[in-house]
């Protein structure tokens, strides 16, 4: 292979010429094309330390503490030893660095594993050495790590973990090369294709061979990331390698998601910094005044530096000294603790056996560790339907053929009977090739087939020909179908059982066994399915020489393509479709057309020109397809059932009861969408009304007067800048639901009317958007985020849900039938929709409560600790002298108080998972962010200020001019410091006990261990031995031994702790007595009777558009060979 390339041709495309396999281009390829080595790692041995430190110091907190460290190295302003900041900062940087290094080692190992996989390129080579233009050999079950155009063989493959195999095929002109290396090496041709891009579903190129152009499209290329199935071997030409492959082009940076608490923390840290500057300014001003009035008399105690020649300079230096001393209002350990809490709560999700799906051996997985508490604040859930609410396992249920409906069964009186497990099934024993697992109950359809009804035969012949299914027959008579979607598999299987068996296909033929007679149809063209066309067609030549076009697709599309003579039949079929949709079934219309040979030949030339075009190929092909897909005759319609997953109605009912707004975004038609609302408990007969489409009329009915300028919300929206306001919550005068289709949604999402949609939808209890595209799903999510500023969650299972999942604050992927693309893009994943209830109401709620308790306690204990320095400044000449021992300052957050608060943050539960699920109302405080907000923060600060006042002045008053029983003075600085710090530690430990709702052995151990560790280290650090060995480092020699033996010291500690804890105890008692919360009612009050809320299950269904794979199969060869969910019931409680 040889590559002709110029840099200025990059945007024009690639030109690959085939001359001689032995010629391996060197410099041209090396300088112009990517090699196939990939690199997802961030560091190497030499760059790890500088790059990782650079990244860590981009965090404002780390940079702030580094700045403090530099300040502490300046002797004139340093009041603390350098190690009080270096030790915690080094620990934080080391822990984060080790975590980043471990993560990057995994990436290095994955890169090494992929890059060193062997591949056959005439000789065996490593993947990373593959270059554009190489010919490689791929074998069954091997992974593809380049984008490859394959000249020979037919391939079935799975991409990105998808369970439904797709079909790719070589061109006829190259498929005859086989595995003959001599033919491969002498083949001369030129490939022209588009430059590297990220469009997975599109590829445009041409192969020029012997002067003829052959169209290349997405069905001729194997993409990186897929796995070869059911294929012994295939050869391929490397088109894109390394980071030029479509998969790597799509692996851009994900949206960085942060929780609402993170955003609040940024604001609060800024407030704290301003508060810190204010305190330091007050103390600096006080020092300047004191220095002016009294400084001269204290020079013997506080000698000034030679460079300090005025009170102003001294005050300036003291300001920075206090910045160092008081910096513990925002300790660096806060950020470490937050990451540990989030990581542990993520493990709880991974380890939850009640979210483990046994049939698929699939556990729940927290794919990110930074969003746990956001799970406890969700107000809007946006859900896909097919495969998310439903099982995505399709069953042919009913059909309409030539105006006759089939599938229902009736008794002797003509009344419709309900189908149960005891209902007798149709006997297909007359058909030796029938699928034994297929079930059907209406005997009249079988009788019509046996009688030779022409339209019935033509209907099932259409189903057996119009598809892209691959057939595998390892044992004669035992057919296994590989379908690109469950719908196609269900339709082909139905045709098979009714006597029209799709047996096999080659590059240009389809073999069908019709009522026991084998017939071979020549495949002339496949007009593939797309989201725009919403239909697919095949053109075949029958054994009798007739040219036939068979088409299936969405009924609204097919109606526009029918011959006018079909109008009466169309009206009857439409009535049947409405009945099918009301039963929750997925529907398709089926039609055909007999073609004139001259018409087809003329159309075929246009088709060739459009298919070989390098520009706007898809648009041109669409126009050509429309020329022949017209004046068709209607055959009938199909109805396929897709059952709901276990527990879906109960889960949705519980989420709605938890005040979570449930929106379903689906590709279904409107009738089907309404039915799923009732099936899933989103819509109910108790609702005042279910509105469809018209937003203004709907909003006026739900809230009369809301269209008038006098309405407060309307007035606010007209006066407020569009980009700055939040749409207030509006309450409807009843219970309503809303259904809107994709066409109406497209207009509703326009900027001038999007608020009409939002205000209307947000007043409804449930919203269903039908016939929506993947882009519209993401737009709906963004609309709610833009104007409501609430936490959103999107859940889906398919590639068409990825945009929605990434747009929401929380993305949840279902690992189901449609593959792993949604799961790989998600923040959390599991196997069944019913687990969403436990993820939010249990794990999300617990994570939110734990994080809020942690932050409230952390800010309280640090303000109480730090502000003692502030009060002490008024009694020490504002000299920036510390109250505590320097070692206590260094260990306070790092050792003495870290373990108890971590234990509470990891194990605390206000109620257990049983009551969390039985009482969904307990979820509401998180939605309103009641447990940690600006008001709660201010309350913590005020309580911290109060505690610091008590700690300082009670100790000051009890030791002022006091003496021991033997007459010795105990009012020295070191004794005072010891009493204050001991009182503080006992106080915050008692406060931790008051905050803890769920006691475990771990809580007890950590609390008592922290106190024990404090006293042990205190006696060690204040021992005579250390103080004599290192007198400049350990200065409190004998203080602990001499002070803690005094009774008045312990009385002071007891009085201080009692006065600080008493307000909290009184507040908790009074609140529980007169205004108890819902949690307190459940925990402490006698249980009120609760009742089970029943829900009516109707049916299950889904319809989602997927891009088709119209493989022409040109190789000439056949393809080769519920988990127990603990507490799923809904309860209500009354008080």
Image: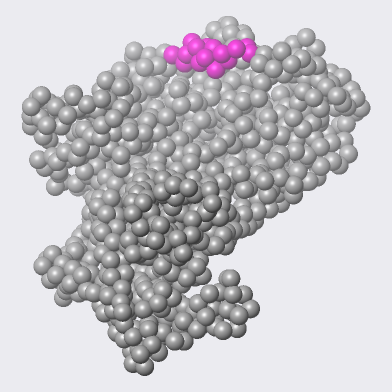
User: In this orientation, which residue lies closer to the viewer: 530 or 177?
Assistant: 530
Taking the image as shown, residue 856 lies to the left or right of residue 49, namely left
Magenta segment range? Answer: 613-630
Q: Position of residue 804 (x, y in %)?
A: 42, 37
Queried whether the magenta region covers residue 1068, the answer comes back as no
Taking the image as shown, residue 17 lies to the left or right of residue 347, namely right
Which residue appears at 14% of the width and 47% of the height? 686
**Above or below for 627 versus 324:** above
Q: Quadrant of residue 1116?
A: top right
Query: Residue lying furthest front in this view?
Result: 297
User: In this orientation, which residue lies closer to the viewer: 291 or 807?
Assistant: 291
Which residue appears at 73% of the width and 32% of the height? 241
Q: Position of residue 288 (x, y in %)?
A: 37, 50
**Above or below for 1090 versus 376:** below
Quarter the N terminus occupies: top right
Q: Main secondary structure of the magenta part?
A: helix
């Amino acid at each position: 292979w040889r590559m002709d390339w110029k840099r200025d041709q990059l945007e024009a495309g690639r030109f690959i010429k085939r001359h001689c396999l032995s010629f391996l281009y060197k410099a041209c390829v090396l300088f112009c094309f990517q090699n196939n080595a990939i690199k997802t790692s961030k560091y190497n041995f030499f760059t790890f330390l500088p790059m990782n430190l650079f990244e860590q110091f981009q965090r404002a907190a780390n940079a702030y503490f580094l700045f403090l460290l530099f300040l502490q190295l300046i002797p004139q302003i340093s009041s603390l030893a350098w190690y009080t900041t270096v030790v915690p900062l080094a620990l934080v940087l080391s822990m984060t660095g080790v975590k980043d290094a471990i993560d990057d080692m995994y990436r290095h190992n994955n890169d090494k594993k992929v890059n060193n996989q062997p591949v056959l390129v005439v000789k065996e080579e490593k993947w990373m050495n593959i270059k554009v233009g190489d010919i490689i050999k791929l074998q069954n079950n091997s992974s593809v790590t380049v984008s490859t155009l394959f000249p020979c063989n037919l391939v079935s493959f799975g991409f990105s973990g998808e369970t439904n195999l797709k079909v790719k095929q070589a061109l006829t002109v190259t498929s005859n090369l086989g595995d003959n290396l001599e033919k491969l090496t002498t083949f001369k041709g030129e490939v022209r294709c588009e430059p590297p891009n990220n469009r997975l579903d599109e590829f445009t190129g041409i192969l020029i061979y012997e002067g003829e152009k052959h169209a290349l499209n997405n069905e001729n290329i194997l993409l990186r990331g897929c796995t070869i199935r059911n294929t012994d071997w295939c050869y391929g030409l490397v088109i894109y390698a390394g980071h030029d492959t479509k998969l790597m082009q799509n692996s851009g940076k994900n949206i960085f998601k942060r929780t609402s608490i993170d955003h609040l923390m940024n604001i609060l840290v800024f407030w704290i910094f301003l508060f810190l500057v204010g305190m330091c300014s007050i103390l600096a001003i006080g020092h300047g005044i004191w220095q002016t009035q009294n400084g001269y008399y204290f020079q013997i105690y506080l000698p000034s530096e030679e460079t300090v020649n005025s009170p102003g300079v001294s005050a300036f230096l003291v300001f920075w000294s206090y910045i160092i001393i008081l910096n513990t209002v925002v300790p660096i350990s806060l950020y470490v603790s937050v990451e540990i809490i989030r990581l542990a709560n993520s493990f709880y999700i991974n380890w939850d056996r009640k979210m483990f799906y046994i049939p698929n051996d699939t556990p729940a997985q927290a794919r990110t560790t930074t969003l746990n508490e956001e799970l406890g604040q969700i107000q809007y859930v946006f859900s896909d339907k097919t495969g998310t609410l439903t099982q995505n396992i399709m069953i042919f249920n009913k059909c309409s053929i030539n105006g006759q409906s089939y599938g229902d069964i009736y008794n002797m009186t003509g009344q419709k009977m309900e189908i149960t497990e005891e209902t007798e099934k149709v006997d297909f024993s007359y058909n030796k090739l029938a699928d034994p697992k297929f079930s059907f109950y209406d005997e009249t359809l079988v009788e019509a087939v046996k009688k030779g009804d022409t339209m019935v035969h033509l209907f099932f012949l259409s189903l057996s020909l119009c598809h892209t299914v691959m057939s595998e027959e390892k044992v004669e008579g035992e057919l296994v179908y590989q379908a690109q979607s469950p719908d196609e598999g269900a339709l082909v299987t139905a045709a098979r059982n009714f006597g029209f068996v799709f047996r096999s296909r080659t590059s240009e033929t389809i073999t069908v066994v019709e009522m026991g007679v084998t017939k071979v149809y020549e495949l002339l063209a496949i007009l593939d399915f797309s989201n725009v066309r919403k239909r697919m067609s095949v053109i075949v030549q029958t054994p009798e020489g007739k040219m036939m076009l068979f088409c299936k697709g969405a009924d609204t599309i097919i109606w526009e393509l029918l011959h006018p003579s079909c109008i009466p039949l169309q009206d009857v079929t439409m009535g049947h479709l409405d009945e099918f949709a009301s039963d929750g079934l997925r529907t398709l219309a089926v039609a055909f057309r007999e073609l004139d040979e001259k018409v087809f030949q003329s159309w075929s030339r246009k088709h060739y020109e459009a298919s070989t075009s390098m520009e706007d190929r898809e648009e041109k092909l669409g126009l050509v397809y429309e020329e022949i897909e017209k004046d068709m005759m209607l055959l009938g319609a199909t109805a396929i059932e897709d059952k709901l997953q276990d527990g879906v109605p109960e889960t949705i009912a519980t989420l709605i009861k938890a005040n979570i707004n449930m929106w379903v975004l689906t590709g279904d038609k409107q009738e089907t969408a309404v039915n799923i609302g009732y099936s899933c408990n989103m819509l109910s007969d108790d609702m005042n009304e279910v509105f469809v489409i018209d937003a203004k009329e709907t909003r006026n009915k739900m809230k009369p007067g809301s269209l008038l300028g006098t309405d407060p919300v309307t007035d606010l929206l007209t006066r407020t800048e569009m980009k700055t306001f939040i749409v207030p919550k509006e309450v409807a005068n009843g219970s309503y639901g809303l259904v809107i289709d994709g066409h109406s949604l497209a207009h509703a999402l326009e900027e001038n009317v999007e608020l009409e949609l939002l205000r209307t939808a947000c007043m409804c209890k449930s919203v269903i958007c039908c016939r929506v595209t993947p882009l519209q799903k993401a737009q709906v999510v963004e609309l709610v985020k833009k104007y409501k500023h609430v936490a959103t969650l999107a859940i889906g299972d398919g590639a068409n849900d990825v945009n929605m999942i990434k747009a929401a604050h929380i993305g949840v992927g279902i690992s189901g039938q449609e593959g792993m693309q949604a799961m790989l893009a998600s923040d959390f994943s599991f196997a069944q929709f019913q687990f969403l209830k436990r993820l939010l109401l249990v794990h999300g709620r617990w994570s939110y409560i734990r994080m809020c308790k942690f932050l409230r306690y952390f800010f309280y204990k640090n303000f109480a600790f730090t502000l003692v320095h502030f009060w002490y400044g008024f009694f020490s000449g504002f000299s920036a002298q510390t109250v505590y021992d320097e070692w206590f300052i260094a260990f306070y957050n790092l050792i003495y108080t870290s373990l108890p608060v971590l234990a509470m943050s990891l194990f605390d539960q206000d109620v257990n998972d049983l009551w969390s699920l039985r009482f969904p109302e307990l979820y509401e405080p998180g939605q309103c962010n009641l447990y940690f907000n600006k008001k709660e923060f201010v309350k913590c600060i005020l309580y911290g200020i109060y505690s610091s006042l008590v700690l300082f002045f009670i100790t000051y008053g009890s030791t002022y001019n006091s003496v021991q029983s033997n007459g010795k003075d105990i009012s020295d600085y070191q004794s005072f410091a010891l009493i204050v710090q001991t009182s503080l530690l006992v106080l915050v430990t008692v406060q931790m006990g008051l905050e803890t709702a769920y006691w475990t052995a771990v809580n007890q151990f950590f609390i008592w261990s922290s106190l024990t560790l404090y006293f042990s280290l205190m006696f060690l650090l204040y021992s005579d031995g250390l103080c004599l060995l290192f007198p400049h480092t350990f200065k409190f020699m004998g203080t602990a031994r001499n002070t803690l033996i005094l009774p008045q010291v312990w009385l002071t500690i007891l009085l201080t702790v009692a006065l600080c804890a008493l307000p909290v105890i009184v507040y908790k008692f009074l609140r529980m007595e007169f205004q108890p919360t819902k949690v307190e009612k459940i925990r402490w009050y006698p249980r009120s009777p609760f009742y089970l809320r029943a829900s009516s299950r109707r049916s299950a269904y889904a319809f989602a558009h997927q891009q088709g794979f119209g493989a022409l199969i040109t190789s000439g060869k056949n393809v080769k060979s519920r988990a127990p969910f603990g507490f799923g019931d809904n309860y209500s409680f009354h008080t």
